[in-house]
Amino acid sequence: MKPVNILLAEDSPTDVKIIEWVLEKELPERHLFKVGDGQQALDFIFHTGDYEGKEDKAPTPDLILLDITMPKVDGIEVLRKVKADQRFCDIHVVILTHSQDEEDLNKSFEHGAVSFVRKTETYEELHSVLELFRSYWTDKHGD
């Protein structure tokens, strides 16, 4: 199976560690790239800023795990910009949040997220989402 390129945009070191642990279990065949704010996520995806001319170090992600509340540019704005661009609109984006606000959920789906995961200490929902993504990825790219 072709390895999955995953961009994790998350500013909490604790959440990064938990997500890495879940990914290790659910998607062992993956390349994980991490950024700590929304602007870095946009720079990674669009090859601007620190990633300009560095396409080899910033491949187009197959999956973006995107914190909704990040410094500089929030997750909804990153999602909106990614989905508005023909080159990237097919990337699967999963929104991660501690928010219980239904408006955040609605905005996420309105702008094209494939899933909305409420963060918990164990990330049960993330396990389920990644298991579905792994099945999709395996069907699309074979063993």
Image (tube, rainbow, N blue to C red):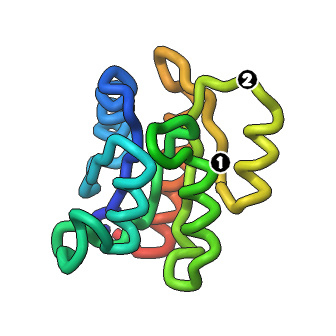
Along the line of sight, the residue nearer the viewer: 93 or 30: 93
- Residue 60 coordinates in the image, percent (x, y): 36, 72
Q: Can residue 2 be seen in this view?
A: no
- Residue 33 coordinates in the image, percent (x, y): 27, 53
Residue at image point 33% right, 41% down: 36
Label 2 secondary element: loop
Drawn side of residue 112 relative to residue 31, left or right: right
**Height in image: 93 above or below 127?**
below
Q: Which mark is residue 100?
A: 2
Q: Are marks 2 and 1 in contact (CB under 8 Å)?
A: no
Q: Quadrant of residue 78?
A: bottom right
Residue type pointed to by label 1 = Ser
Quarter containing the C terminus: bottom left
Residue at image point 66% right, 41% down: 116
Crowd class of label 1 (few under 14; some 14 to 19; many from 20; radius 10 Å): some
Q: Residue 126 carries which label?
A: none
Crowd class of label 2 (few under 14; some 14 to 19; many from 20; radius 10 Å): few
- Measure the alpha-carbon separation of dots 2 and 1: 15 Å
Q: Earlier in the sequence, mark 2 or mark 1?
A: 2
**Label 1: which residue?**
115
**Height in image: 67 above or below 33?**
above
Drawn side of residue 114 relative to residue 43, left or right: right
Along the line of sight, the residue nearer the viewer: 61 or 141: 61
